[in-house]
Amino acid sequence: MRLKEPHINALVLFGLLAIPLFALVTDEPFTITLVTRAVILALAAVGLNIILGIGGLVSFGHALFFGIGGYAMGILAHHAQTYTALDLGFFSTSGTKLMPIIWVVAMVVSGAVAYVIGLLTLRTSGVYFIMITLAFAQMFYYFAISWPQYGGEDGLSIYVRNDFPGLNTLVPIQFFGICFVILCIVLFLNARLQASPFGLALNATRQTPTRVETVGLNPMKLKLLAFVISGAITGLAGALFADLNRFVSPTMFNWHLSGELIVLIVIGGVGRLMGPVIGACVFVALEYFLGGLTEFWHIYLGLILLCIVLFGRGGILGLLTGKEGVHV
């Protein structure tokens, strides 16, 4: 019996909400933090899935935007907690510990960087696009290592989690609630985007760019806009991830993270709305349960990924619904 995708999507969201609530009742705060981590990684993967699943662009450097979001949070919070001015040339600021402001800054900066990088990288395609995005991420990685003002290779610690009006973000269930609501909002907007004229045009660009040009649309502009939206969402996830750990480091730019985000999407289902969410849940669960047994737990992750690629091209969602995912 094949399940309908909307039913699976609702079940996944219900499970993401039910597990932390059950952990709250049984007084297991670590489980809440674990699910929060899965939600944040899912948010980052949802951002990547916009260009990968809809646009057919395989970016191996999306950790770049994840790291920018993290450092945007870290730098603003660092100056706020040390009462030092952040000199930006045209003006200076004392930083902030308000989450909404930090999120806006993280998304704007990540989107702006995505725009500049997109102008350069989207002139290429295939393996050249993959390698150029990887190169940009590694450039930022080594820049962060050589930035002693903000910890360099050792990273930057934030003593107290940032503030959200009306909530105590140090309480795990409340911080989870913030992340979960943001994920739901982004998923809703993503669903609307896929069904919008822009989403349909972007999907057409992935399949037949020549025909898109024939009807008067510019494939480059479509892909660039998608790249900017994708970078902004991933940057928001990076800010939340740094807030979760109260720590930011150059490893957030590492290419391993870019690869993990792609793996999450492939496991769940490329181009599927909830594919990144399912993939993130599976990844975090394997990391927790198998990581406690052996440090080589990635072997089992590799076997799962291999089976999906060979026998279930639509990911877990494809296996459950009987529909293949997007081919990129």
Image: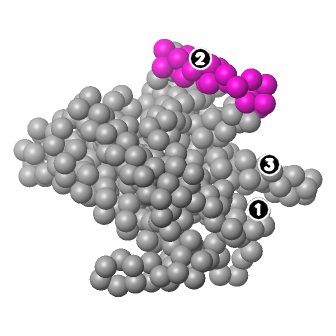
Picture quadrant where residue 232 is located: bottom left
Relative to 210, say whether 32 is above or below: below
Q: Are marks 2 and 3 in contact (CB under 8 Å)?
A: no
Residue of label 2: 303
Label number found at residue 172 = 1
Relative to 34, say whether 283 is above or below: above
Amino acid type at circle 2 is Leu
Residue 143 in the magenta stretch? The answer is: no
Label number found at residue 31 = 3
Percent x, y of residue 19: 78, 49
User: In this view of the protein, can residue 11 be seen by the observer?
Assistant: yes
Binning the other alpha carbons within 10 Å of mark 3 as few (below 14), some (14 to 19) or many (20 upward) gives some
Q: 133 or 247, which is in the foreground?
A: 247
Picture quadrant where residue 25 is located: bottom right
Our reading of the magenta stretch's main secondary structure is: helix
Q: Are marks 1 and 2 in contact (CB under 8 Å)?
A: no
Binning the other alpha carbons within 10 Å of mark 2 as few (below 14), some (14 to 19) or many (20 upward) gives few
The residue depicted at 63 percent of the width and 72 percent of the height is 162
> Which residue reaches farthest right?
26
Amino acid type at circle 3 is Thr
The earlier-in-sequence mark between 2 and 3 is 3
The residue depicted at 44 percent of the width and 78 percent of the height is 86
Mark 1, secondary structure of its residue: helix
User: In this view of the protein, can residue 265 be seen by the observer?
Assistant: no
Q: 254 or 311, which is in the foreground?
A: 254
In magenta, the rendered stretch is 289-310
CA gap, disc 2 to disc 3?
A: 26 Å
Binning the other alpha carbons within 10 Å of mark 1 as few (below 14), some (14 to 19) or many (20 upward) gives many
Percent x, y of residue 47: 44, 51
CA gap, disc 1 to disc 3?
A: 9 Å
Amino acid type at circle 1 is Pro
Mark 3, secondary structure of its residue: helix
